[in-house]
Image: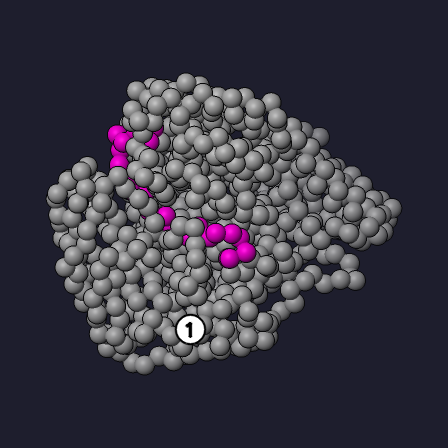
Amino acid sequence: MERVGTALGAEAAAERVSVLLGPGLNIKRNPLAGRNFEYFSEDPLLSGTLAAAQIRGIQSQGVAASAKHFAVNSQETHRMSIDEIVDERALHELYLEGFRIAITQGGAWTVMSSYNRVNGTYANEHVELLDEILRRRWGFDGLVVTDWGGNNDRVAGLRAGNALEMPSTDGVTDREIVRAVEDGTLDESVLDARVDELLTLIDRTAPRDAAPADLDGHHSLAIEAARRSIVLASNRDGMLPLGRAAGRIAVIGDFAATPRYQGAGSSLVNPTRVDTPLDALRATDLDIIGYEPGFRRRGAASGRLRRRALRLAEQAETVLLFLGLDESAEAEAVDRTHMRLAQNQLDLARELIALGRRVVVVLAGGAPVELPFADEVDAMVLGYLGGQGLGPAIADMLTGRANPAGKLAETYPLQYSDVPGAASFGRTEATSEHRESIYLGYRYYDKVGAPVRYPFGHGLSYTTFAYSDLGADATTARVTVANTGAVAGDEIVQVYLEAPDAAAGQVRAPRELGGFARVHLEPGERATVEITLAEHAFQVFDTGIHDWRVAPGAYTVLAGASSRDIRARVAVDIEGERVDLGGSPNYTTGRVTAVDAAEFESLLGRPLPPATWPTGRPLTRDDIIAQTKGRGGFASVLHALIEGTSRALMALGRPHASNNVRFAFDLPFRSVERMSGGTVDAAMIDGLLLMVNGRFWRGARRTLSAWWAHRSRPARTAQRMRPESED
């Protein structure tokens, strides 16, 4: 990750870009979250460690990294207004911990605040988050920047610690700052501090004579990064790697020729090149007899494509089936509505399996999907979004030129209904209640003993590894790993910390990741791997003192190949002051799907705010455009116009543009003026609000009048400023 970050920084520097807007490291709370493809993991230690490495690499080139989105950016639905309701312990142990690691170990020069509210306050105005935690507790000395259009109250943001609003509003909110200083509601010293932070960033990223980026070398790095990340999820009877026994091979699936190599939305970039899996496979010694796309990209059924694929498969002995989520399924501003692959892909997979040929599935996408056919195929390869070098990486892994070693950074549930919060995620209006608290991902599944498709940390190899001689103390674990197979390979050794008595009767996960390390071993080679345990390995966040505290007891240190493939264990006694980790029945057992409002309120220590939008009142500047739905009149027309435009663009095969249009739904009315750079002014917004609130003609007249006045204002201003000699 640090090498990748260095390459990204070098390319940014060559283009005279001062700030690279990444890495994104929010916790993957739910598989349907639209921005999961940008984020690292469901585990904060893994997220923070990888983010810190990338930050160090980027900033080594004089380019600032921007750790984002701070904080609790857990969904895209109504992201600019949603209030993420989360208890204090879960906030610190899960949602903030990765950022703490990224800041303290990576030294990020900028942090991007998220759009959403956190427990009632916009993240960009959250004094506790931006000042007390980020700066005072973690020692951050950089600049906080808003997400694009993520400013609610500019002056409140300045007070909390935000220095830079993006994009520029061409003076719209600058005037708010001037008025606040003049009327005494904003101390000028606060403004000075924010200016100092901006000047510091300018100094840190001062233009340098950057050499042109080594694009060939970076492409080779992209291949290596993809190769090291691919996860071999299943491999029945040693089907992979492919060799002569594979015989005649049919390549089927649109993603083989037109790969998903990145997500959609603001993260979209233009690659210098893209190597496709199909081209890379044809360049090998495999007997590739043909290729068929098999299905249309965005789910529309095609009998012709399906029949051609089946005919090709009938001539083969092995089928390489490339499936995945299309560009419209994973994008900024849109959460997925289900966890399934497109039906036409599922139908094709079933028919190919029924032919009785060997089937190897290569899956593309940035988050888990349901895989009902997983037990019926011969191998499952999770390629995720492999970047521009994914083609050679996949071919190398399938043929054995590279030994897979990637491990899953998130759990694959059997079905979406198994996910805590599945019933409510992305379906509420004003708030998103994190009733599952600390029980996310493997912490939840391991607590309740739920079966999963693939556990956190899972990933197979073409060789085998044996663990022995595990030893541990309060800071370090050491374990000997031996390659007991016939080929060289890498193993990612994972250390988990099992809570005393496996956390029975406590609000605590039974085990948590405490550290990890990657080791390369030749056949027969062994090595002792030493892993430094996480800073908070034996601690919990004590809400009584609002700080971390060691939770004493008899722990078990586990070493394994996944959260459920434990190979060695050793006991460690940890001393400390007793922490009360008891709670209500559903929280002590982890059965959080049964938590009701009263139990969640008890955990929070306060009443829950309303979960729905207010009804029966006119919309205001602080409401979002999505609230026009179902109000009738012009409001419904406006909603239908945006929805129809989005659907039309999707039908025209322009998913990125479609998603950008849908971005408007979650835009507060107040932001229209700011995002337009003042082209639309406050008076026009007031007229538009009259129109959507049922007073169409009066609002239309006011909007037109405001537009005319605004249009002529620059001319009058220019007339007043013209030198006398020009008259």
**Residue 538 makes an appearance in the image:** yes
69 or 446, nearer to the observer: 446
Q: Amino acid at mark 1?
A: Val
For the point 16% across and 63% down, the residue is 471
Q: Chief secondary structure of the magenta span?
A: loop
Pointer 1: residues within 10 angstroms few (<14), some, or many (20+)?
many
Whether residue 459 sits left or right of residue 655 in the image: it is left
Q: Considering only vertical position in the picture, is 480 above or below 260?
A: below
Q: Considering only vertical position in the picture, is 89 above or below 259?
A: below
68 or 239, nearer to the observer: 239
Whether residue 34 sits left or right of residue 478 in the image: it is right
Q: Measuring from the top left, give residue 311's x and y in whole percent.
A: 51, 21
Image quarter where the C terminus lies is top right
For the point 23% across and 41% down, the residue is 463
| Residue marked by disc 1 | 507
* The magenta stretch spans residue 398: yes
The quarter of the displayed image where residue 657 is located = top right
Whether residue 472 sits left or right of residue 718 in the image: it is left
* The magenta stretch spans residue 241: no
Q: In terms of secondary structure, where does tag 1 sit?
A: loop
Q: Measuring from the top left, give residue 312's x and y in whole percent.
A: 48, 21
**Residue 51 makes an appearance in the image:** no
The quarter of the displayed image where residue 90 is located = bottom left
Q: Measuring from the top left, give residue 69's x and y in whole percent.
A: 47, 52
For the point 33% across and 22% down, the residue is 286
Q: Measuring from the top left, give residue 113's x and y in whole percent.
A: 48, 53
609 or 164, nearer to the observer: 609
What residue span does the magenta drawing correspond to?
395-419
Q: Considering only vertical position in the picture, is 70 above or below 128?
A: above
Q: Considering only vertical position in the picture, is 436 above or below 525?
A: below
